[in-house]
Image (cartoon, helix red, strand yellow):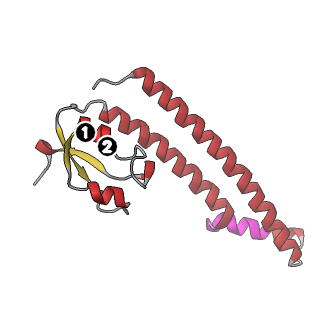
Amino acid sequence: MPIDKNFLEDYINTRIKLFFESILFDKIEFFGGIQERIIQLNELGLDENAIVEDLYKELLSKNGTISKLEKNESNELWALLKGVSQYVIWSAFDDKTKYEWVMNPGAQHCGGCLDRAGQVKTFDEWKALGLPGSGATQCHDNCMCDLVEVSNKKK
């Protein structure tokens, strides 16, 4: 299955657009969280310097609202890069070759992945059923599973 450059370009553009929309939403949530924290601290009677100090400590400790923004952006970027790389890798797969659904031993897995683990199908059959990270399982694009060519699988 050769790489469909038009599909790949559209896919990348869509994922990038979603990435920046998510960052925008995260920024709005971030500023709302900061504002809420400032109000809480003010209601506790802290002066401006104490509030700034509290927010600064939160920044340095990687806790709360500031850390959440950073983690969300990191997760969105990971999903973008993972999706693009999976498409490029899968474009080199032979549609008639058999592949086994293999779970990442260090990850948590949804019921869909647990049901598919160890099953062997042709790439065409996996495409029809849903590839790892395609949204076909409950873990959606968070899936950490892989398809491993049966003839290349180490025993």
Figure label count:
2
- At 25% from the left and 56% from the top, the residue drawn is 117
Q: Describe residue 4's horizontal placement relative to residue 45 as left or right.
A: left
Q: Does the magenta-highlighted stretch encompass residue 46?
A: no
> Which mark, by number, is residue 129?
2
> Which mark, by number, is residue 35?
none
- At 74% from the left and 51% from the top, the residue drawn is 28
Residues under numbered marks 2 and 1 in contact, where contact means CB atoms less than 8 Å apart? yes
Q: Could you say whether the residue bearing mark 2 is in a helix, strand or loop?
A: helix
Q: Quadrant of residue 40?
A: bottom right
CA gap, disc 2 and disc 1 = 6 Å
Q: In terms of depth relative to the viewer, which is nearer, 130 or 10? A: 130
The region drawn magenta spans 52-62
- Residue placed furthest toward the bottom: 44
Give the x, y percent position of residue 72.
58, 53
Q: Quadrant of residue 108?
A: bottom left
Mark 1 sits on what residue? Answer: 125
Q: Describe residue 137's horizontal placement relative to residue 96 as left or right.
A: right
Give the x, y percent position of residue 65.
68, 62
Q: Is residue 50 visible?
A: no
Give the x, y percent position of residue 71.
57, 56
- At 53% from the left and 36% from the top, the residue drawn is 15
Give the x, y percent position of residue 49.
86, 69
Q: In terms of depth relative to the viewer, which is nearer, 94 or 39? A: 94
- At 32% from the left and 56% from the top, the residue drawn is 113
Per the picture, the main secondary structure of the magenta-coloured stretch is: helix
